[in-house]
């Protein structure tokens, strides 16, 4: 199993910044993709940004130019730097990873429990 633990959520004013971090632990053999999804009240979960082990990123159009994703492969961590936050960025942010464990060679998806980000004046 792979456990994902997020930190860094909170309350911020519009235009402010927050940084989310996520650490993966467990019987990890390889983490292929890490990233962030979010879910606002009454809406479906949506992609924010992902990053591969080769640092190839995929960002949602709504966050391009404002959010930056990065990862440390050696530490199995992923960061999301969020700048110029807007009211519509308010959501629960979930850490995501796709990887293989030492006991199960087939890649599968893993999710964190989520961290609340609230943008409000």
Image: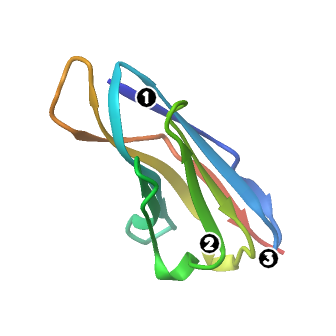
Q: Horizontal placement of 2 versus 36: left or right? A: left
Local crowd size for mark 2, using a 10 Å CA cut-off: few (<14), some (14–19), many (≥20): many
Return the residue at label 3. 14
Q: Does the image show residue 17?
A: yes
Of callouts 2 and 1, the N-terminal one: 1
Quadrant containing the N terminus is top left
Q: Residue 109: percent from the left, percent from the top?
A: 28, 43
Q: CA distance from mark 2 to mark 1?
A: 25 Å
Mark linked to residue 3:
1
Q: Mark 3 touching mark 2, by CB under 8 A? A: no
Q: Residue 102: percent from the left, percent from the top?
A: 26, 19
Q: Nearer the viewer, mark 2 or mark 1?
A: 1
Q: Does the image show residue 90?
A: no
- Picture layout, residue 19 above or below residue 107: below
Q: CA distance from mark 1 to mark 3?
A: 32 Å
Q: Horizontal placement of 86 versus 97: left or right? A: right
Quadrant containing the C terminus is bottom right
Mark linked to residue 30:
none
Residue lying at 42% horizontally and 72% vertically, measured from the top left: 43
SS at circle 3: loop
SS at circle 2: helix
Residue nearer the viewer, 116 or 7: 7
Mark linked to residue 89:
2
Q: Residue 87: percent from the left, percent from the top?
A: 69, 78
Q: Horizontal placement of 42 versus 116: left or right? A: left
Residue lying at 78% horizontally and 72% vertically, measured from the top left: 120
Residue lying at 40% horizontally and 47% vertically, measured from the top left: 53
- Picture layout, residue 50 above or below residue 119: above
Judged from this view, the residue extending furthest toward the bottom is 61
SS at circle 1: strand
Judged from this view, the residue extending furthest toward the front is 54
Of callouts 1 and 3, the N-terminal one: 1
């Amino acid at each position: 199993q792979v456990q994902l633990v997020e930190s860094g959520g909170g309350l911020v004013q519009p235009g402010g910044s927050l940084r989310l971090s996520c650490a993966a632990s467990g019987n990890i053999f390889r983490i292929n993709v890490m990233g962030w999804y979010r879910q606002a009240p009454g809406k479906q979960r949506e992609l924010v940004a992902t990053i591969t082990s080769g640092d190839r990123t995929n960002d949602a159009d709504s966050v391009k130019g404002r959010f930056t994703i990065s990862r440390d492969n050696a530490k199995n961590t992923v960061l999301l730097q969020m700048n110029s936050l807007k009211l519509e960025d308010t959501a629960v942010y979930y850490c995501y990873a796709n990887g293989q464990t030492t006991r199960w060679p087939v890649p599968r998806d893993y999710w964190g429990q989520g961290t609340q980000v609230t943008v409000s004046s």
